[in-house]
Image (tube, rainbow, N blue to C red):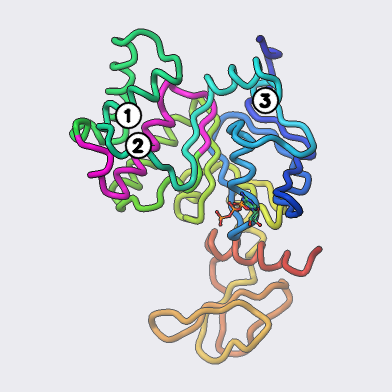
């Protein structure tokens, strides 16, 4: 099945997804090209549900999903989409008795990756990319949590997908592996579309050219990290004293407080001075500010 030549990798209009009586996505619109898009939102906001819909793991209850211009609800479209995407699910689970190499080779067979020789070359390639080559003969059950996470990433990279969907990929990675992960993903994003759902704001700041904030099944922010930070300017403060109620605050190591005030005109009072907002401040403010909206 062929797709329109200029179709974006991801095009979603009015996407709704119900689980029984619960509505996890309430009309999501988005269109994604190359680069890394960070999907942010509080627990239960709908990030995993959105990724599962893009990964052809869940069907839309209503609305339109097109991947590479193809319709995942049609069998031919779905098969072609699956050939072209890589998906790292939340809490990936693998057959524990396989070796690392054997498991990836098995997944490569399912991905229809050519002859035995080509497949093995591809498995070696993703093992090197994820720093697991030295563990290729280990049983999956003997891997640490971070290594399993890298194995899941290796599986998602098989075949060089044009669309890479990563659901909390850096959970359990040590700092060195997180840095390796970031440079791998930013390299891949030169030629492909990456969607990264995460609670790790540092990863978003380091990697994402675009951020989508989800809140209760809706996109409440779509823009660059810089846009999001700008919205927090004049609303982040540090100082001594009691910041009082009505704003988000936390105690710093030196005993002072960092305070987020929801409106630009608010001030926590004497003793507090406005400071440069971080992406995390901006994210907290933005999702917090939206709390009052229906
Ligand atoms: N299989 C399911 N059955 C019923 N409800 C579900 C199911 N999966 C998710 N939900 C509900 O759908 C909503 C969105 O969940 P989802 O897992 O997409 O959120 P999330 O943003 O990925 O959260 P988290 O950050 O905690 O992973 C939540 O209210 C959740 O309880």
Q: Position of residue 107 (x, y in %)?
A: 39, 25
From the top left corner, tell me how far across and down residue 91 is, in percent: 45, 47
Say which residue appears at 25% left-offset and 32% top-offset: 99
Using the rendered image of the protein, determine whether residue 213 is visible from the camera's viewpoint: no
In front: mark 1 or mark 2?
2
Q: Which mark is residue 95?
A: 2
Rounded to the nearest whole Å, what is the CA distance between mark 1 and mark 2?
8 Å
Q: Magenta region: which residues?
A: 138-165
Nearer the observer, 205 or 131: 131
Q: Is residue 174 visible?
A: yes
Position of residue 52 relative to residue 287, above or below, is above
Describe residue 174's horizontal placement relative to residue 83 as left or right: left
Closer to the camera, 59 or 152? 59
The dot on residue 103 is 1
Look at the picture and state if 98 lies above or below 207.
above
Taking the spot 65% from the left edge, 86% from the top edge, the residue there is 245
Residue under label 3, please give it.
72
Residue sitting at x 68%, y 47%? 222
Which tag is nearer the camera, tag 1 or tag 3?
A: 1
Asked if the magenta segment contains residue 163, the reply would be yes
In the picture, residue 133 is in which quadrant? top left
Q: Earlier in the sequence, mark 1 or mark 2?
A: 2
Give the image location of residue 120, x and y in percent: 29, 17
Which numbered disc flags the more N-terminal residue, 1 or 3? 3
Asked if labels 2 and 1 touch by Cβ distance under 8 angstroms, the answer is: yes
């Amino acid at each position: 099945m062929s797709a329109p030549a200029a179709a974006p990798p991801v095009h979603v209009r009015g996407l709704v997804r119900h689980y029984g009586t619960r509505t996890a996505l309430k009309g999501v619109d988005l269109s994604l090209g190359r680069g890394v898009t960070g999907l942010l939102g509080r627990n239960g906001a709908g990030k995993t549900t959105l990724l599962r819909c893009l990964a052809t793991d869940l069907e839309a209850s209503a609305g339109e999903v097109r991947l590479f211009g193809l319709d995942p609800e049609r069998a031919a479209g779905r098969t072609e989409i699956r050939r072209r995407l890589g998906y790292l699910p939340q809490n990936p689970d693998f057959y524990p008795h396989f070796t690392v190499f054997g498991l990836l080779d098995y997944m490569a067979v399912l991905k229809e990756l050519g002859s035995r020789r080509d497949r093995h070359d591809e498995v070696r390639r993703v093992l090197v990319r994820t720093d697991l080559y030295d563990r290729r003969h280990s049983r999956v059950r003997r891997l640490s949590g971070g290594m399993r996470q890298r194995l899941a990433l290796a599986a998602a990279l098989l075949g060089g997908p044009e669309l890479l969907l990563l659901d909390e990929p850096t959970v359990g990675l040590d700092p060195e592996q997180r840095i390796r992960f970031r440079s791998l993903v930013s390299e891949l994003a030169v030629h492909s579309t990456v969607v990264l759902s995460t609670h790790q704001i540092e990863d978003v700041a380091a990697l994402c050219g675009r951020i989508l904030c989800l809140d209760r099944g809706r996109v409440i922010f779509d823009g660059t990290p810089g846009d999001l930070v700008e919205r927090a300017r004049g609303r982040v403060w540090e100082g001594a004293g009691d910041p009082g109620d009505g704003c988000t605050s936390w105690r710093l190591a030196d005993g002072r407080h960092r305070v987020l005030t929801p409106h630009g005109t608010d001030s926590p009072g004497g003793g507090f001075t406005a400071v440069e907002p971080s992406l995390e401040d901006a994210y907290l403010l933005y999702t917090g500010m939206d709390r009052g909206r229906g």
